[in-house]
Image (spheres, grey):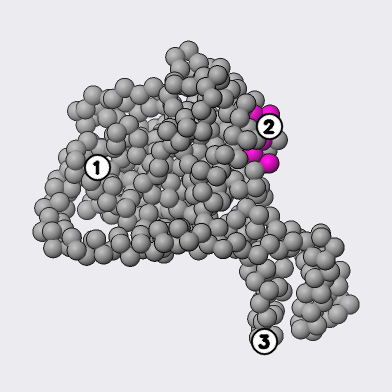
Amino acid sequence: MTPQSSFMIVAAVRDGQLKDLRALLASMNNLPGHADPDNGLIPFGKFDRVHFARFVIIEARTAQEIREFGVTPRPWRPTLAFLGDIDGDMQTFFLELIERAEPGLKKIFSHCEGFSEEDQDLLGWMKANNINASATYVNWIGRTVRQIHEEAALHRSLSIYLQKTADDVGRENVRALRQKLLSYVEMEKYKGTLTLTPPEPTPPEWKMRNLLHMIGVPLILLLLSPLLLVIALIFALRLRMLERSDPELFIRPSREHLAELTVQEDQDVSNQYSVFGDVKPGVVRLLTFKFILLLTDYFARHVYNHGFLARIKTIHFARWVFMDNNHRVFFASNYDGSHESYMDDFINKVGWGLNLTFTNGVGYPTTQWIIKEGANREHAFKYTQRRHQIPTEVWYKAYPGLTAVDLARNSRIRQGVEIRQSNDAEIREWLSLI
């Protein structure tokens, strides 16, 4: 299989360049916040390895909240972030990006500190300004953009053909019907109108790193367990003391801010989500946050890597990134459905998971022992996440109109073409997917 990777290029915007940069990024869109795949700066549609990409101008808008903790807000300049989720490795993708979109990239990055259009080392600058995520989630590791498009075309083609031929063969004659569909697929493949590209070999270096990570993390935790058990109780009690002393913030997002966010949403079956905020002060909060994200990344890579995150099946990609020397954190996701349903899904199904991963962020509703309360206080949680959400200037999705559930169904249809079903019940189930 071809594993996925991510990138996030970050640079402060030059003084006086923010307005021009927003206008330039807006020129890439054909809908508010949604990229034209064939835009003149970065024609995302020509890259067959990009699942999702976005440009975000990260601004700190919640200084009032950090002051409630008795801490002076750290200075933060508006910062441009270019991030994406891709098939294969970042280095190879950066080379492709420069080959096909170097003038557009230089034009965009020339609004940032430390870069000019005359700068010849674009690759070096992008790599130097890339920030690695502390935790990432991929809905289905190994499912490529090419595979998604090919399997979607297979589903469409079989669906149309099945409607034409079902009555002739007889809907109850499932074996004959399946054979008819398989013959049709072979004919379409021969004509070149359908392709089902075999998966590429898994890169040996990725397999080795993944294996070492899968074994190494629990092994290290096991070796450290005597020490961890000693400090766990002290740590837990200290966290509980901090929870009880946290200020309770119940601040509604402004109508203007909500309007700025909602105008970009529900243009497709999927949406984007970008959140930025402060980490609660103190080394205990930071270490807890980092440890939780270490576990989140581990389970996302080795357990929740085939279609669902805990009980949530609507997320395509997500990431958590520490910024500003670990004083701030950025979260981004690509999900199916409306924003409201996305939040309700998490609150109702894995509210404890929200609490674990976000309770150490400033402004989050107070929790009890990390996992209780918090997101269960629905209005306070929804106000908080909207207040910390930032607009996305440009967002690209490689397969509009398709949800994560659609992708899983299409893969099962392909498996039914390539793998023989043993009984009529399995064939009926396969046919029902079409």
Contact check, label 1 and label 2, Cβ < 8 Å: no
Percent across and percent down for residue 356 are 31, 52
- Name the residue type under label 1: Leu
Report x, y in % for residue 81: 47, 32
User: Could you tell me the amino acid type at mark 2?
Assistant: Asn
Q: Residue at x 18, y 48 (%)?
A: 239
- Residue furthest right as drawn: 168
Residue 239 lies left or right of residue 166; in this view the side is left
- Give the residue pinned by disc 1: 286
Residue 45 sits inside the magenta stretch: yes
Amino acid at pointer 3: Asn
Instruction: Give the vertical position of 177 relative to 80 (above or below).
Output: below
Spatial distance from mark 3 to mark 1, Cα to Cα?
55 Å
Q: Can residue 163 be seen in this view?
A: no
Q: Give the range drawn in magenta.
A: 40-46
Sequence-wise, the earlier of marks 2 and 3 is 2
For residue 423, the mark is 3
Does 246 appear above or below 114? below
Would you name the residue on which mark 2 appears? 39
Q: Nearer the viewer, mark 1 or mark 2?
A: 2
- Residue at screen point 28% across, 25% down: 74
Q: How many numbered discs sit on the rendered protein?
A: 3
Q: How crowded is mark 1: few (under 14 residues within 10 Å), some or many (20 or more)?
A: some
Sequence-earlier tag: 3 or 1 = 1
Residue at 65% x, 71% y: name it: 415
